Amino acid sequence: MTPSSRYVLGLVAGACALAALPVSAVTAAPPVAHFTLTNGLEVVVVPDRRTPVVTHMIWYKVGSADEPAGTSGIAHFLEHLMFKGTAKNPAGRFSQTLAAIGGQENAFTSVDYTGYFQRVAREHLPMLMEFEADRMTGLVLTEENVRPELDVVLEEHNQRVANNPSARLGEQVQAALFLNHPYGRPIIGWRHEIEQLTRDDALAFYRRFYTPENAVVVVAGDVSVDEVKALAERTYGAIARRGEGQARQRPQEPPPSAVRRVILADPRVAQPSLQRSYLVPPGHGRHLPEADALDVLAHILGNGSTSRLYRVLVVEKEMATSAGAWYMETALDPTRLGVYATPRPEVSLEKLEEALDQAIAEVAANGVTAEELTRAKNRMVADYVYAQDNQSTLARLYGAALATGSTVAEIQAKPGRIRAVTAEAVRAAARRYLDKRRSVTGYLVKDGREEKRS
Amino acid sequence: MTPSSRYVLGLVAGACALAALPVSAVTAAPPVAHFTLTNGLEVVVVPDRRTPVVTHMIWYKVGSADEPAGTSGIAHFLEHLMFKGTAKNPAGRFSQTLAAIGGQENAFTSVDYTGYFQRVAREHLPMLMEFEADRMTGLVLTEENVRPELDVVLEEHNQRVANNPSARLGEQVQAALFLNHPYGRPIIGWRHEIEQLTRDDALAFYRRFYTPENAVVVVAGDVSVDEVKALAERTYGAIARRGEGQARQRPQEPPPSAVRRVILADPRVAQPSLQRSYLVPPGHGRHLPEADALDVLAHILGNGSTSRLYRVLVVEKEMATSAGAWYMETALDPTRLGVYATPRPEVSLEKLEEALDQAIAEVAANGVTAEELTRAKNRMVADYVYAQDNQSTLARLYGAALATGSTVAEIQAKPGRIRAVTAEAVRAAARRYLDKRRSVTGYLVKDGREEKRS
């Protein structure tokens, strides 16, 4: 595990692949325990005793959407700085200790959360929790360790965004989709604001959000609930509640009303492409019935080579070389459902978009077939079952859910809910939400004068 | 003056008509005085002794771009609430007194400032300043007078925005142009946020921003500087400095990079139209040379029936029934230059946009003619001269300038600067700033299924 790979910018689209659950049938769901310490810290324990290994994660309920205006990127920058050490454990000791015992670690930032992950042999769990609890309050930042890390983050921006035309377009589409909600802000931050981030910004953000009442610890693996409870109380439980409100009151979106298009031209584009995001409800609480229908809809539309968009655009009309769809259900606030396609060389993006519009209008008008519905549900439930087999996937599933307004019960009930989604619910979701007025369509094109001028 | 017309939502585009100055030659500029009281309040005096009338304005350096996130509309709502009275002058007394003496009044909110205006016979100026100074600190708000006013504002939103397709499109274009800066927020606010505004929000905003050090008083008319100075010291000078910083640090825009289009369909659209905004520098300080060139450019492109866009699109190509351009130079932060056109019935918006693009590309490539340049400059300088003739226009000119980072000296030097703008500077400004990647193009179309679905 190199330092550069340690810092994974939580691509939200990534989280949805996981959240696109599956469950080994409700009965086979793991006996997950969920409790809260007196200081407000939540703990989830997912026993999995097949191998003597544990996955430990801490999720802070804070992401880029919680950043003070003008300091975009501070959530992600702080994620980097969390590896700079404490008075008790100087910089490097945590990671070196993990490496020495053959452990793995990772960290990620998303719009709604920031998470830290480790996997170790079971006997090292107590030490791990001590390290992690220590850095919840003990972080030491100096100008000497902050400034160089800012350069690391700026270089990460170069690699991930500035030199990646598709990521640049994604930034523009997201910014155009959210007119008022901070989801419109890039997770990594706007470069001109990243450049101005300071030690003081990081410390203020850390003190405000890295508190026991704002954290969820997930332990999955060869442990008992009682054992984790005792450990959690001894380590995290010793941290005083900060007493800050947890309200994550972000400015919300006005009802979307305009069809939007964004064209990004970049000389490095080898292959034009099209992506579109729709504003849709997130997957928790009162949104669930529609969210489940949207989840099934996204699978039918765009998951794999049997999906509707692939079949119509790639196979039947031979206009595209790829096509698909996704739904970012793991989010606190209204979120995105995306569709995308790459045209064959002789097909213009306008023509491809027309065909895409038709394919989507067809679903809104006439719904999906019984076969499509059954295939999607079976696949989704099977995915959920397979996920039970992966300790870190499970840990991530629960952590992300609890950090975005969902619950253990909602996660566990997901397969049952998916099975209950009707063809009519899928059609209704398509009709209501795949309305172009709720969307931004992005074109990625090779740079040419005609795109730039006027 | 009815209560409903009293509340003028400061249409920023309106301010630019004024700011598109003129000056009776530098030598004929009025002997304007500008001084600051010890509590930080700035005063501008524009003597104009032709009639025994004075115009009094107070400008607070706070507008919709200074609102806390999630409370859009609070600047404008507070403007309304400023007429609710104080302990000393109960609701209605100020306005009734003005009406009784034949005075006029008005108020307006913009992205950068909130202003209050009165015009009275000269002998009433002392009373006026006492009233206005009193409500800088003495405002009394109760649930009983706040709630009904919120309904007034919501009704204003209905009339100005919700039932006005062109205004709805303007909101969407502005929101799509500013990805990070709060200029993307409507001045009147997003309706769902206006609905949630409270007395506490208004009082917090009032206490934070309605302070002497955040205000500019402009008195134009039949007064001497000494007289106004004495009056200002006696009235406003008695208010203690609040001591809050004045920093108006708004999140700034990333470099614009994507060509954007917004399509709004509304069943009430009788006539489709097209509007485009470009992100450009504001008209003060280090931006001035380019801002002056942009000002001349906007005049050449789109001011009147001899302008370039009108000539090409309306007269020569017969594609449009109207066409024009404007520059919103009076702004603290990077701002907008707009172009617009209305197609003839048989012309599509796409074709009209192509022709518009060509006309703009022509200016960027080959510049403007000597005749166009001379005509625009003469017109702009003449406008400035004529403005000297209008007391309230002058007062507004200086107030808006000082509330948006400009100075009395910059305003007075404007005619000289305009005369000095070269054809090459105009061409360079067009080439640099009328780049489609810096812009959002809005289409207003009649509602039809094909615009809404997919």
Image: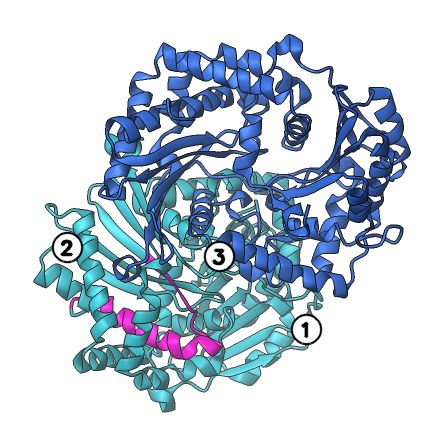
Chain colours: A blue, B cyan
Residue B2 seen in the figure: no
Chain under label 1?
Answer: B
Name the residue carrying label 2: B320
A46 over A137 or under it: above or below = above
Disc number for residue A162 = 3
Which chain does tag 3 point to?
A
A413 relative to A442, above or below: above
From the viewer's perspective, tell me whether residue A187 is left or right of residue B13.
Answer: right
Q: Which residues are magenta?
A: B277-305
Q: Secondary structure at mark 2?
A: strand
Outermost residue to the top:
A27
x and y percentages locating residue B245 in the rendered image: 67, 66
Residue B442 coordinates in the image, percent (x, y): 30, 49
Mark 1 or 3, closer to the camera: 3
Is B284 included in the stretch rendered in magenta?
yes
In the rendering, which numbered label is found on residue A95?
none
User: From the viewer's perspective, is residue B130 above or below residue A67?
Assistant: below
Mark 3, Cα crowd under 10 Å, few <14 / some 14-19 / many 20+, is: some
| Residue A238 visible in the snapshot | yes
